[in-house]
Image (spheres, helix red, strand yellow):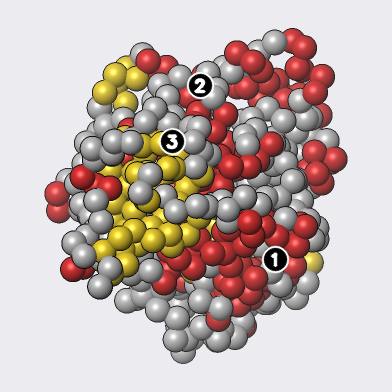
Amino acid sequence: MNFLKRKYPVGAELQASGGTHFRVWAPRPKKLELLLEAGPGAPAAIQLTRQKDGYFAGLVPQAAEGSCYRFRLDDAGCFPDPASRYQPDGPSGSSQVIDPSAFTWSDRGWQGADLKGQVMYEMHIGTFTREGTWQAARQQLAELADCGITLLEVMPVAEFPGRFGWGYDGVGMFAPVHLYGKPDDFRCFVDEAHRLGLGVILDVVYNHFGPDGNYLSEFSADYFTDRYECDWGEPINFDGENAGPVREFFLTNAAYWIEEFHIDGLRLDATHAIFDASPENIMTVIGMRVRETVRGRKRIIVAENEPQHTKLVRPVENGGYGLDALWNDDFHHSAMVAMTGRNEAYYTDYLGKPQEFISMVKYGYLYQGQRYTWQKQRRGTPGLRLPPERFVTFIQNHDQIANSGYGERVQFLTSPGLLRAMTALLLLAPGTPLLFQGQEFASSSPFCFFADHNPDLAKLVEEGRTKSLAQFRSLATGEILPYLADPANLSTFERCKLDFSERERNRHIYDLHRDLLRLRRDDSVFSAQTTGAVDGAVLSEGCLLLRFFGADGDDRLLLVNFGADLHLDPAPEPLLAPPDGTTWQTLWSSEAPRYGGIGTPRLDSEDNWRIPGHAAVALRPESTE
């Protein structure tokens, strides 16, 4: 007797006894047929059996790996499988039966990734290399590991329309986009990352579907809801009528990426647009499902949350959602004001002053419930006692680079000295630092917004993008419009690809990042990420001091001066005093000539403290005996 065995409630699954079993949630049509269109078993049309709760299912003996199929609904339209594992011809083409067990993994000993100690690296596969493929990206992983990166955060890869895009308008939630290669190419990428000691988490979009190639409403209108508003599309129905199968669809998707691609966790995009008034929030359940799926391995779930709700990372038993980390936009915004002097639009409530950075190093978010002028409301919730690694800090990411108008990297918006100093603060502070692809070698490639849509939709996207940028007074003038990149133009996408020859041309910046990451990893005080183990003081309008407390007086100082040279005499600040029987010696300086600096005289001398401007210097105690 043949026994049916399924792993997931939806999708096409090969059976050990032969054939493929198909199952899809489609309560709208009365009749659903499977059309085998190419590959093994084709052509054929097989009517699937209607089951309870709106599902259709059936075993198709002639369907095998490589078979291409679509679903015909009520003898009318034909559509791809909502849970397709691969769309070789794009989101509107046929789905393909994939055998995930055919890939041979070599990461049996991989234990997963824990949040503490990570250095994250956000990457977009389409622009990370000239080829824009998994295979090409895999060739660069050894260099990233050698640089000191430990965790890759891959921007969304769910199937989307067109020749290029950021990935946030995905429509094939289970299908790695065909533009980057086949599903096994993704698996090879993850397998190689694990071999090199790199974790991999995937950015997933559970708040909307893209506008083009989205056929879910043909299967059921209950995938979406009109009870909420989302800036990018119809909100997902997680708490309304017939929400059960919708919730299960996304829970299955989370488990699928973990199980079939061995990724180490997820980055949940724009969680403030995931609406759910259920007794058990969908994000809580996603966390539980991921923990069940990893089967003892470590995992990381990071959330982007614009209103800064710390509830997301609090334990479930304490009323939280049980996720692991939150993006800290506050750090980025203060850093940009400090480096550029501009605080328009959503930078309005930031001054880029030393106290802001001291507070963020100690407490995470700057805004934890205070009034927020830009939004004319309170922002954030308390997080004073959260561990520092819970906050992911950055000075560049995909959104923020693109929002500069021209898509320029931060080195073109500030001075070399300020950038080196801010990089030191980012990489030595106890939060979890994130770098954006190419940041480690000061890539000159921009990162513009790009999306390849049909002409009508492309025009709407461009208009929406221009309107979004108009929140910046300097970008709201008509004179800049001719200079903004066209998101639908192929050249906009091509200009964003990295040029790895810049690793050598910008060797001083690359060495800066490598040395800082080595110091962060190897120095027991900087690597500790211990709650409450850092204190700070404002030394001048532009200069801050951080003291990292180590064991038995083995402390570290980090002096960061965004202003002019500072002669601190007198120096009535106890955090400057060295541990008993020691003096402060320079451990690392952003002004080292190997980084493009001009050298660093002794900071603490008979002349009292002299701290160079636009610089960061780390010090350690040295015995005077």
Q: Residue 137 carries which label?
A: 1
Q: Could you tell me which secondary element the residue under label 3 belongs to?
A: strand
Residue 329 makes an appearance in the image? no
Element marked by disc 2: loop
Are circles 3 and 1 on residues that touch, CB within 8 Å?
no
The residue under the point 52% across, 52% down is 600
Q: Where is residue 78 in the image (x, y as percent from the top left)?
A: 70, 48
Can residue 379 be seen? Answer: yes
- What amino acid type should be assigned to the residue bearing mark 3? Leu
328 with respect to 420 (left or right): left
In three-dimensional space, the C-alpha distance between marks 2 and 1, rounded to whole angstroms, equals: 36 Å
Q: Which amino acid does label 1 sit on?
A: Ala
- Tag 2: residue type? Asn
Residue tagged 3: 566
Indicate the position of residue 12 as horizontal and vertical percent values.
Answer: 57, 67
Identified at 53% across, 39% down, the residue is 614
Residue 539 appears left or right of 218: left
Question: Residue 5 is drawn in which quadrant?
Answer: bottom left
Q: Earlier in the sequence, mark 3 or mark 1?
A: 1
Q: In the orientation shown, which residue stands out farthest toward the bottom?
A: 1
Q: Of tags 3 and 1, which is closer to the observer?
A: 3
Chain-order first, disc 3 or disc 2:
2
In front of the other: label 3 or label 2?
A: 3
Q: Residues within 10 Å of mark 2 (few under 14, many from 20)?
A: some
Q: For marks 3 and 2, give the CA distance.
A: 25 Å
Which residue is located at x 49 percent, y 36 percent?
565
For image coordinates 79% across by 30% down, the residue present is 486
Residue, disc 2:
343
